Amino acid sequence: MKQQNKRRPLWLALLLAWSLVPAGAQQTNRETLYTSAMEDALSRLRMARTAEEYLPCANRFERIARAEKDRWLPYYYSAYALILQTYEMEVGPERDPVLDRAQELLDQAFDLAPEESELFVLQAFLLPSRILVDPMSRGMALLDRVFSSLNRAKSLDPENPRIYFLEGMNRINLPAAMGGGEEEGLALLRKALDLYENQSDLPFLAPDWGEEAVRQELMKRGKLPSEG
Amino acid sequence: MKHTIRLISLIATACLVSTGILSAQQRISGQVLDARETTVPGANIYLENTYDGASSDAEGTFSFPTGESGDQTLVCSFIGYEDLRVSLFLNGRDTSLVLILKESAQAMEEVVITAGHFNAGDKKKATILNAMDIASTASALGDIYGAFATMPGALVPGEEGRLFVRGGDSRETRTYMDGMWVQSPYFTKVPDIPTRGRFSPLLFSEMVFSTGGYSAEFGQALSSVVDLNTNGLEPQDKGSVSLMSVGGSVSGSKRWENSSVAGTLMGTTSVLHHRLFRPRVDFLRDPRTLDGNLMFRKRVGEEGLLKIFLSHNRSSMELMVDHVAEDTCDRLALTDRSGFGTAVLTGRINENWRYRGGVAVNLDGNDMVYRSLPIDETHRSGQAKLVVVREGNLLRQLRLGAESGLETQEQSVRTEPVVRLFARDRWSAGFLEGDLVPHPALALRLGIRLEHTSLTESFRVAPRASLALKTGEKSQVSLATGIFHQNPGFTCMKWKPDLEPEEATHVILNFQRESGNRILRLEAYAKKYTKLVTYQEPDDVEPDHYRNDGHGLARGIDVFWRDRGSIEGLDYWLSYGFLDTKRRYRDYPETATPSFASTHAFSAVAKYYFQRPALFTTLTLTYASPRPYQDPNSAGFMTGRTPAYRDISMGITHLTRLWNRRLVLHVNLNNVTAFKNVFGYEYTQEPDAEGVYASRAILPPMDRQIVFVAILSLEKL
């Protein structure tokens, strides 16, 4: 009798204590929930290939973004997924509403992190998709913005390989008169590759795309630097 | 013991539930449809403030688990549709829903009233042209009005350089910038030499050219309105220098966080040009101009924008004017100064109301010495305008505005004694106009304008109405009608200031079909003029001779076809206008077709981009049927006919690089094949010995014109 009496309060105390713990544990719980949700969304994004596959990825990131409210990364990835979707769509005005939405999401990311290099890179990734819809009228104005966004990204983080990836791709595909040049473009891609290969470990969930595309482009032109 | 365990498990469950580790799970599933019951794949359905959600699949169905409980809000969103919010109470039971999305107002393909106007801008809807189209139309050489002349219903007679719309005189077209009236949108007109617009098309993000039936917001134009909207904030710092065969310019812009400034300074002189292409006109001093403008933009508050535009222009020239009529050759020296300044503030009053207010000042003056007689003219005006706009759903927009201004014009002929003629008008106007969209396929616009002028101390009421109805997936019909008033010009008012305003009534019917890259527009119109001012002879000095008893009628059909890209790399448009017009005004003894009207006018503009070498070329073909002129050697009035007008113009642009900067090289050739065009004839006052009146043909200043332009950007690539 005496033993049972002793145990009951102990059990109760433990349970009650456990129910109080969540105050701090909930915080860690949220962090874990966020990280695992983002990881899941990212792995699905990496598998997506078609326009129909990119939209649910964008939706997934948008749900996380709206629930979290003050993290820029889910907004970033949501916009990124929509931009990738437009590149898989037919070239035409149907791209515009999707790009409008991507720009809205990117703008929300900018509000949360106005000095983030990756956001300026993403802006420079979005604009060429718009240009392709109507190059004659949009080319002039938007191309300037592509390069000014990349320059801003450079000033914030000169080691970001994606800057040189996008700059390189743009320069290769533009006529010389508009700032293009194959040699220059390839040099930039090589610089990007160099940065990709030598970058220190990135923080978890940080953007890490582009390396494959750089390799493919260099390989296509037979300009891949020989591996040691 | 049993009780204890039960109590413990109960508490344990309660705690686990409260920590969310063990919670009541349920599924939320359903289907997403739009208003037409079509499935919506890819919609985003989720519980607000949670991660729980899913995207709808190819059949619009979705399903996801959630551990949330109690009051929740389910959100469903999809691009182009309004977000749908549903209140749910979750208690562990699966829920199934059908979600019906409503198209958002912006995404809906709503019909837009198109009768009587062309929109040139970058907006996606109802855009026929954009700013680059205007800037690159070969025949126009960067002149906004010259480019509008390639639209049906618009003519720019070769010796004029100004727009004449649908049988209306050039003064019947008014230009507005950001809603404020621009008193002199053209450079000063000199006899027989065409003038051109003062502003570069690159200053504007949108230009609306109305050929009739225009909004109640504008008035004092019997035929048409050109509404220019300046660019917003400059996107970034820029600079460029340009060199032309007729002069040079320098321009730049600077952008700060919430403001920007942009300016251009340009000087032109025809010296070199006239050495290369001998003009018919005998210039004692080649025309030269100095032009500068400054645009300042600043964001004000959350949604407001302040726009300040300042422009100043000076030009001078000296030439010998050939007068067959007087059998003399007279020296004309002209110096012209023009200044325009406007400040416009737009902003939001509250959720539904916006406002737009502005002030503008126009200061123009010219000093002429003609036949050794100095004549000075000044034209000054100041205006203020305020418009409030309410946005809604059925009543899509309600606009209420008031404006007022003061305009004075003065002409002094420095004879002995000095002859001074003066006219001053204190005017005010108010308007109320509403856009109703009862259905996406029907749009209505009703407006009323009230104008008051101090010249006659009288009011004029001008009702305006237009509508558009969708007749098929890609086609629509549109109707516009209204009454328009305009005070008689200074040439009449300086003699008799209390002349009544002239009046015109328009009816326009339009059919438009847009399919992918192609657009077809057919428009039929009728304009009835009343109270046009008549007098007995040119420069009639008898005030009583000026009366409002003239009248006129203009009717016609305009056809427009544009195809952008059906043929790879080619963008072209064709326009044709049929015009039947007669009027009795000015010193006309009887009703006749005016000398600026051509019965048939045709324009073709084609733009093509060659890849190798990188050349952007434009070609413009223009034809206008013979114009009437008064031939005293024939019986009747205005019975003479000039030869038809033909012109083929070309522009070639090459983009290249210089000193690691962007370089644009452009050459423009006007009247490439040197057609011999005659715009009219001028006759002597008295017949010669055989009773024949001698004549002189009014010809273009030169047969062919070539202009070279090179523009270098200052930013390194």
Image (cartoon, rainbow, N blue to C red):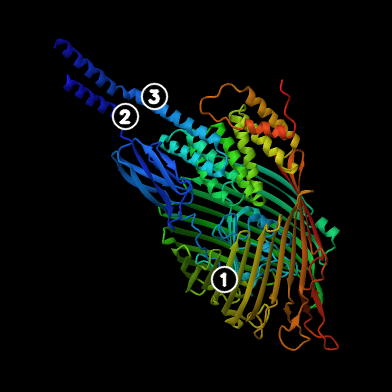
Placement of the N terminus of chain B among the 4 image quadrants: top left
- Point out the frontmost of discs 2 and 3: 2
Q: What kind of residue is marked 3?
A: Thr
Q: Which mark is residue B510?
A: 1
Q: Residue B53: x and y, percent?
A: 41, 40
- Point out the frontmost of discs 1 and 2: 2
Are dots 1 and 2 on a single chain? yes
Chain containing mark 3:
A
Residue of label 2: B22
Q: Residue at x 82, y 69 (%)?
A: B675
- Give residue A19's quadrant in the image: top left
Q: What kind of residue is marked 2?
A: Leu
Q: Residue B414: x and y, percent?
A: 69, 69
Q: Residue at x 64, y 79 (%)?
A: B581
Q: Mark 3 packing: few (<14 Cα in 10 Å), some, or many (20+)? A: few
Instruction: From the viewer's perspective, tell me whether residue B674 is left or right of residue B584.
Output: right
In this view of the protein, can residue B242 be seen by the observer? yes
Q: Work out whether mark 1 precedes mark 2 in sequence or the reverse, and give the earlier one.
A: 2
Q: Mark 2 packing: few (<14 Cα in 10 Å), some, or many (20+)? A: few
Judged from the image, the secondary structure of the residue bearing numbered disc 1 is strand
Question: How much space separates mark 2 and mark 3, taking CA atoms?
Answer: 17 Å
Instruction: From the viewer's perspective, tell me whether residue B235 is left or right of residue B717.
Output: left
Judged from the image, the secondary structure of the residue bearing numbered disc 3 is helix
Chain containing mark 2:
B
**Residue B688 sits above or below residue B102 on the image:** below
Chain containing mark 1:
B
Q: Residue A140 carries which label?
A: none
- Point out the frontmost of discs 3 and 1: 3
Residue of label 3: A28
Q: Residue B671: x and y, percent?
A: 79, 64
Q: What kind of residue is marked 1?
A: Asn
